[in-house]
Image (cartoon, helix red, strand yellow):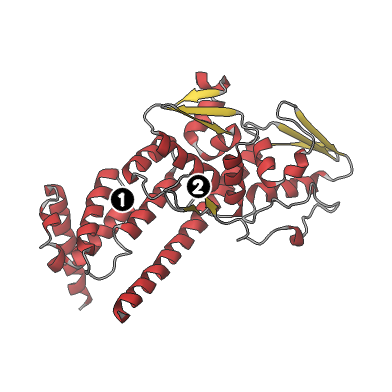
Amino acid sequence: MITSEAARLEFQVKERKHKDQLKRCLSSALSADLNRLLQEELEADVSLYAGSGSIRAHRAVLLARAPDVLQGQTHKDPIIIHLPDYELSGLKDFLRRVYTADQSMCSAPIIPDVEGSVPESTLPAPDKADLHRSTESDAVVLEPASGLGADLLDLYQRGEQCDITIQVADQVFSCHRAILCARSQYFRAMLSGSWMESSRQRITLQGLGPDEMEILLQFMYGAIVDLPRRASASQVVLAADMLGLEGLKDVVEMVLTRDYCRFFPKPADGVQRTVLECLSFTHALGLQNLHMQCKRWVAEHFVKVWCERNFSLLPPELHRACLTAVTETMEGNLNMI
């Protein structure tokens, strides 16, 4: 019992460590994507005038992060907001925080103070809006990578002032063009380029299922760090490849590392079988980082792993790869003597 409890606690520590590392990477990527959106003014639909100049911004981001800025504006209004009492530099700094700060900013002030800074006391603690629960009966708690992701995911779930819909099979998803362009090169090319879909308010996607599309959108808005329990890892990877969402593939790798490899403990309780399954999955899906980790683990514990029936069922190329890995491991150990 002591051993079992110790193993459980060790597993939980490893899971939290992996998730924290993944959250940092996804949070940084989300902030960088939105900062680029702000700098390039792609799909900008709000004009803010202050001091001697103006800045173009995005209704969707402001709705999610600083909704008071848009107070009194309707969805169909061309949004032009004059702030004559504020300096342009202060407004730029405020918008940079809105687009990139990790903390949730739903209670941020309508505009920065005269000096252009946002008082720290107005920013909520990072963990106040950290978890979101899906409405599906079999869903898990959605964990955004940051408060920024939490705010954007709230916007998606509310469906407020969406300006484009995506039809997948018989299901329609309401979205915001700016977020799609910021987070996906596929949508960026489609909606801002010369594709015929660029001027449409509804687009149809082929080759995806509604379940995968929902996960893609949750990731694009919230940078979620887990998948619903019934999600198909292979379908999510294929969908992520289609839309150019490399970060979502990192999420799949974390889920497979947890659910199949159990963060690579010593051989016990059938973990050999599931690591071999993951070895095969990652080879087929092209998840090279996790595939290499599986191969190294198999090589390290080959005496116990190779007697598994699942090992005999691997394709010949994986048998050869595992044999090569064992040879390299042995040679490395000899060189250390």
Q: Where does the image place residue 232, in percent across and percent down from the top left? A: 34, 44
Side (left or right) of 3 relative to 85: left
Say which of 142 and 185 sits in front: 142
Q: Quadrant of residue 266?
A: bottom left
Q: Considering depth in this image, is 30 or 155 the residue closer to the camera?
A: 155
Q: Which residue is mark 2?
A: 134
In this rendering, the count of numbered labels is 2
**Which residue, given by chain and number where applicable, does mark 1 sit on?**
288
Amino acid tagged 2? Ser
Residue occupying the point 78% across, 55% down = 117
Relative height, residue 203 to residue 105 (above, below): above
Q: For label 2, count other residues whose C-alpha is less than 10 Å away and answer few (under 14), some (14-19) or many (20+).
A: some
Q: Can the viewer see residue 2? A: yes
Q: Earlier in the sequence, mark 2 or mark 1?
A: 2
Q: Alpha carbon of mark 2 to alpha carbon of mark 1: how far?
A: 31 Å
Q: Residue at x 65, y 46 (%)?
A: 99
Say left or right for 33 vs 92. Answer: left
Residue 58 in sight in this render:
no
Crowding at mark 1 (Cα within 10 Å: few <14, some 14-19, many 20+): some
Instruction: Give the number of the mark in front: 2 or 1.
Output: 2
Q: Name the residue at the bottom extreme.
A: 2
Q: Residue furthest front?
A: 137
Q: Identify residue type, mark 1.
A: Gln
Q: Secondary structure at mark 2?
A: loop
Q: Is residue 1 left or right of residue 202?
A: left
Q: Residue 287: x and y, percent? A: 32, 48
Image x and y of residue 130, in percent: 57, 57
Q: Quadrant of residue 206?
A: top left
Q: Secondary structure beneath disc 1?
A: helix
Which residue is the extreme one toward the top?
196
